[in-house]
Image: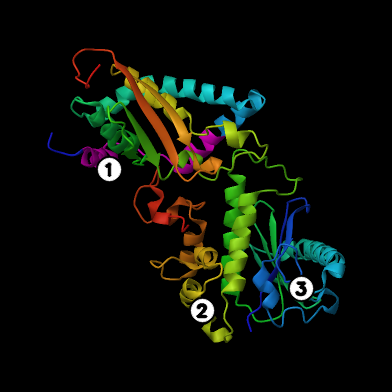
Amino acid sequence: MVSRIYLVALMGRENNPLYVRGFGPEAPSSISRDQDSTGASSHDDSCSLATTGTEVSTVRDTELRYQFLAHISLDVFAARSPQKTSDSDFGLLFVQDGMAMYGWMTNTGVKIVLGFASGEVISNEIRSIFRAIHFAYISLVCNPFYSVDERRPIHSRKFDISLRRIVDAWNGTTPVHTPAESISRASVASQQSTSNGSGSGASTVYYSNTSNNGTVEGIVMSYSGSRSASPTALPSGDSGINSTSATMVVR
Amino acid sequence: MARTPRQVGEEVWKTRIEKVNAELVTLTYGSVVAQLCKDFGNDYIQVNEQLDKMGYNIGIRLIEDFLARANTSRCRTFKDTAEIISKVGFKIFLNITPTVGNWTPDNKQFSLIFDENPLADFVELPDDGKAVNELWYSNVLCGVLRGALEMVQTQVEAQFVSDVLRGHETTEMRVTLIRILEDEMPVGDD
């Protein structure tokens, strides 16, 4: 059973929270189909799909819990940073409350944390998610109207939508399968997602368009759509005012 | 010349143009617009006007560069002009080819429909309710067209009518011929 993303958090260089958002079934921003998922809240009886009466308090509990987990991960980052050599990937940070937290620190000190529910996750795929989130963050920062003030939290509709797409692509289209198949999951998922009616438009963005061969780089490229941070990724010779058709956004 | 404008544009783009990083252009233009908005206290109408003026100053100089590189023959009709603008002009300077369409029956007005706009990559208009109704982010392009065409004796008016940044379906610029400043070019009834 492949685990689902329940939490995405971004923290700034000074360990201030930039963005904490839950995607689990109890989270207020979750989409309706999450509520049909089975085996989701095994770790949390108090947050079971409640009636409207208790819904507000459980939602608030969940949010607090996510904030708490995000802050714990900051400690882990601080503890491990001295030994970390070059790679941005911090891998598995810790496991708490049935949630496994994975971390990624960018060169500018921005930390991305992902919280997974129970289940196996392959590190290569985690990296592609981190990269996709990183690209979404880059797109946000490149917006000339966004003040890159490290202290203020992120309030951007485009960023919300991008993250929702990334998480949906991971959560929504994952079938039940063994870890051995996970490498080829990209192609499976894209086929599945095109036949899957609900929200398939969003999920195909993450995994690929039909011309893509499903490698990790390919996935990330087709997701980010716009020119990636390193122009060397472009297939054509000139680096310059290139047409974006080479890395076109899949709508 | 037997070559179509599209071929001319492609050829010039490939051979005679030095390239620069696209992100540099995007970020530079973005900071210009953002700074203008700050300087004018979010008076987006003023910002539009300033962008148009800047574009005009760019256009009157850019036309020389364009004519030197493209070396196309003189346009006989306004329709030719439109084709050259979209297939050669925009191709050389931004590597995009907006579609020409929506001609009025008297052939004096057309639309340029942009399906991609490198100036507006990554941009999200500020959420203050005003920008999304008042700011034309790429307004510099209107000024460029106006300035460039004025130097070749064609007086036009150019303005955006829709913009994906504002939530519309397409980004569309409407170009209207006001008058030709010379008798040589026949342009229908004038």
User: What type is the residue that disc 3 sits on?
Assistant: Phe
Distance, label 3 to label 1, CA atoms, is 53 Å
Q: Give the residue displayed 32% in from the left and 38% down from the top.
A: B101
Residue interval drawn in magenta: B5-30
Which residue is nearer to you in this view: A95 or A226?
Answer: A226
Q: What is the crowding at mark 1: few (fewer than 14 residues within 10 Å), some, or many (at least 20)?
A: few
Magenta region includes residue B12: yes
**Whole-percent x and y of residue B51?**
51, 25
Which residue is the extreme one toward the top? B182
Callouts 2 and 1 close, C-beta under 8 Å: no
* Residue, disc 3: A94
| Mark 1: secondary structure | helix
User: What type is the residue that disc 2 sits on?
Assistant: Ile
Does B63 sit left or right of A79 as displayed? left
Distance, label 2 to label 1, CA atoms, is 40 Å
Query: Which numbered circle lies on residue B66?
Result: none
**Whole-percent x and y of residue B55?**
45, 24
Chain bearing mark 1:
B
Regarding residue A234, the answer to whether it shows in the image is no
* Residue, disc 2: A183
Q: Is residue B94 above or below residue A111?
A: above
Which residue is nearer to you in this view: A9 or A90?
Answer: A9
* Residue, disc 1: B14
Chain bearing mark 3:
A
Q: Give the residue displayed 19% in from the left and 39% down from the top.
A: B4
| Mark 3: secondary structure | strand
Q: How has the structure been colored for display?
A: rainbow
